[in-house]
Amino acid sequence: MIAPSILSADFARLADEAAAVAGADWLHVDVMDAHFVPNLTLGLPVVKSLLGATDIPLDCHLMIDDPDRWAIGYAEAGAYNVTVHVEAAADPVRLAKDLRAAGAKAGLSLKPGTPIEPYTEVLKHYDTLLVMSVEPGFGGQKFMADVLDKVRTARRLVDTGHLTLVVEIDGGINADTIEQAAEAGVDCFVAGSAVYDAADPGQAVERLRAQAARHRP
């Protein structure tokens, strides 16, 4: 699965930019609050507008403080998958249940320095694990290959039936890095500049999908 990140899109033309990747599996939306991360992007009003402009399921990645308070609004608005950071959530198990009750898939994200092992029981309540392969908050960063150990651990837990979730990766994914991420066991690849800096974003999505499929274990 390929999830183009609109962080790399033209914010003045979001509906057109979504249409340019009509074949994508998810459309990744980075919500930043200038508190949990130092950058500020967009919020619920823009997400609601985008929901009315595309049929691609929205994958909302909330890099925000107090997601227990704010995340439910994105689920109620119609986002397909709402991901919160374990480092910010006060009660991640309860939050997962609330997100599902509001109609969304529940995702849990880990920063590069956050280990997966303390959260394996928590992840039983989630539909998606988003492994960050850059520090959250900015686009265009270099891929951190050492996080693939977390991906391999998650893949093992899924394959052995201990977890039932989509393993997603976000940060520095492009033609040079997607193969090693696929080999580690990633299911869904977030790609920003690799898609939106291409002459044809739709074709870039298909190339990345084919490249990843060839290297899946």
Image (tube, rainbow, N blue to C red):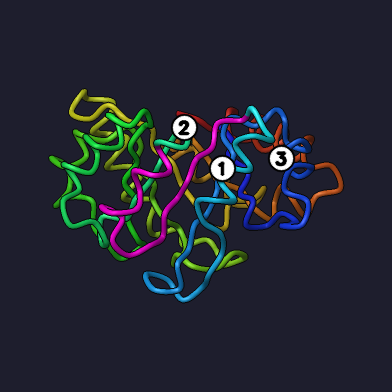
Which segment did they paint magenta?
56-75
In the image, residue 92 lies at what x, y percent?
Answer: 20, 48
Is residue 154 left or right of 205 when viewed as pictured?
Answer: left
- Mark 1 lies on a secondary structure that is helix
Q: Is residue 30 above or below residue 17?
A: below
Q: Is residue 185 above or below residue 110?
A: above
In the image, residue 18 lies at what x, y percent?
Answer: 71, 40
Kind of residue indicated by mark 3: Ala
What is the spatial separation of the Cα atoms under label 3 and label 2, in whole angstroms? 15 Å
Residue beneath label 2, please?
Answer: 80
Please state which of the two labelled residues, at mark 2 or mark 1, is closer to the viewer.
1
Residue beneath label 1, please?
Answer: 48
Quadrant (top left, top right, bottom left, bottom right) of the N terminus:
top right
What is the spatial separation of the Cα atoms under label 2 and label 1, in whole angstroms? 12 Å
Is residue 18 left or right of 190 when viewed as pictured?
Answer: right
- Mark 3 lies on a secondary structure that is helix
Residue that appears at 55% across and 49% down: 29
Residue that appears at 49% across and 67% down: 137
Residue that appears at 32% across and 35% down: 155
- Mark 2 lies on a secondary structure that is loop
